[in-house]
Amino acid sequence: MPEHQSQTALPNTGSPQRARTPALAESVLSARQQQVLMLQRTLGNRSTLRLVSSAPRVQREGEGETAPDETAPVERWTQTDRDMLAAFANDEMVIGSYQAGIVPRAINHLTQPDYEQFRALLDNASSDLERAYICKALAAGRNLTDLSRFAGRINGRSERWLRRNLTLVNPNGGGGGVTQQYSDSCAPTTEQALHGQFDPIYALDLRSSGNIAQQTPNALSDPSSLANSREAREQRNLLTNGGGALADRATGGGAGMSDTNYRAMVNRLANTTGISYRARYIPTDLTWAQAFRRMNRGLDAGISMPAGVTGSGGGGHAVLLTQREGRRYQIHDPWTGETVWRTRDDFRNNTLNLPSGWNQMDMIMVPSEIELGRYSEDESVTNARVGAELDALDV
Amino acid sequence: MTPDPFRDYTREEQLALDLTDLFDDGLRAPDGRMRPEVQGIGMTAAALQAIEEGVPLEFVGLMLTNARENDLQTTREHPEDLTEEVDECCPKFASLIRSAVQSCRDEAEYRMLVQWIANVHQTMSAHRLAHG
């Protein structure tokens, strides 16, 4: 008898396909699957994005009444691991619930030798904060070679060091974040900041290439004045490949990227972020109330959101929404590398007064779909469906 | 022994230089510019000795990033912002940087130190390009 028909205690419902009626399905589905079903039914009533992405994939220890199946594979992501990451649930700048939700799936896709190596990295880490960053790097799609190098470098580092050097924006507000080196490289710089928000290895590597916060006045005409040539090279390539034109900060006269190219650029980071962003304009596509809801949902899950600001004289500037506290939102302004907190009233009244001088946010990029293709299992289908329904809600 | 800025040093001599006292008189000369023995032979000797000690280039890059972000007061309160990585692996270089921070008398002199670290970083980068 085929193994999938061995549950003789169940009523005879015909083919396995038909067995997926709600009444029967809930009796045979795992707790995880039941949770997803429940979420699908209640979609729209809460932050499904956050809940689904953070739902643990494996059964909890001690869950259920039956004796452990000794032939089952050893659980790779334990309750202890979940508790460890859960301790950072309200610390989106370390690892948000979105990336934390990717970790179990990523771990289950490791080969056994890679898993053992990864487990050793966690065991050897000096603190849970280190472990969280190692998990974050895994969620960003890093391989074991990168993870091993990274874990070695951060081993034993202080909390102050970790929090400071594993991001490209200043989470405490103020300067020091990644800064545009050319007159019109705001969008590429925002892409760098976004990349650093998801991938601590990228952040550390870029910071280790030299000062990321220098406002070089003549980066184009005098490249020797650059403090971080990698930072500038990446901005140069992203800008020119995105249809922009280079110019010195001191003189201006270059050209920025269109919103279409800006969005395409940040979406090319999907291998790292797992996210596809959609540009939503305010007030054309979204009221401020709708925009705030989307900002809350993304930022609360630890998903930074690229955005655009403009002014009465036209033109525009790219910035990154990085976190929120209640009704305040933090914005990274790439012109100066500063992060600033602004209230909802500042957004609504076009009085942002950013360090770059811009006042009016007119576009946010909403994470419209969670792409879990690289961890393709049943969850990826579920999440794609949820993503599509979130899209529908977004209209 | 403070290096003599008015003579050439071989590579071996630079590696053998004792830089312990390099910053005893600060970085700034009375004319307001960086002291020549600090800027010239002191800088290249520090870079060569850092390479010899095995200081990874990216550690100096990160040190530079954090040094530029800090002001003097913050760095005085948290010298580990600059040296936390090298304290562990490369104590000689870490000690040199710590003594340099201690010698800074004001913010302007600290900015001079940041420029000095940038020059060390640049020299190490050039060395890596030339020698792999």
Image (cartoon, coloured by chain):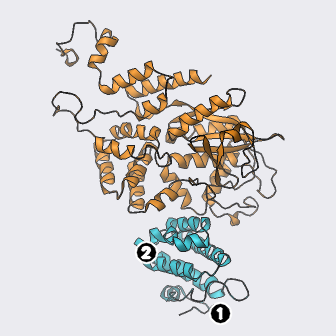
Chain colours: A orange, B cyan
- Which residue is under mark 1? B6
Instruction: Determine if marks 1 and 2 fall on one subunit.
Output: yes
Q: Is residue A255 left or right of residue A37?
A: right
Quarter of the image for residue A317 reads: top right
Determine crowd level at label 1: few under 14, some 14-19, many 20+ residues with C-alpha closer than 10 A: few
* x and y, in percent, of residue A249 in the image: 76, 56
Could you say which is closer to the camera, residue A5 or residue A197?
A197
| Res A372 seen here | no
Q: Is residue B100 left or right of residue B35?
A: left
SS under mark 2: loop
> Residue placed at 70% from the left, 31% from the top?
A282
Could you say which is closer to the camera, residue A180 or residue A79?
A79
Q: Amino acid at mark 1?
A: Phe
> Residue placed at 66% from the left, 86% from the top?
B35
Q: Is residue B76 above or below residue A342?
A: below
Could you say which is closer to the camera, residue B103 or residue A136?
B103
Q: Is residue A204 above or below residue A29?
A: below
* x and y, in percent, of residue A353 in the image: 74, 48
* x and y, in percent, of residue A174 in the image: 63, 57
Quarter of the image for residue A148 reads: bottom left
Determine crowd level at label 2: few under 14, some 14-19, many 20+ residues with C-alpha closer than 10 A: some
Q: Amino acid at mark 2?
A: Cys
Q: Is residue B5 left or right of residue A354?
A: left
- Which residue is under mark 2? B90
> In the rendered structure, the residue with mark 2 lies on which chain?
B
Q: Earlier in the sequence, mark 1 or mark 2?
A: 1
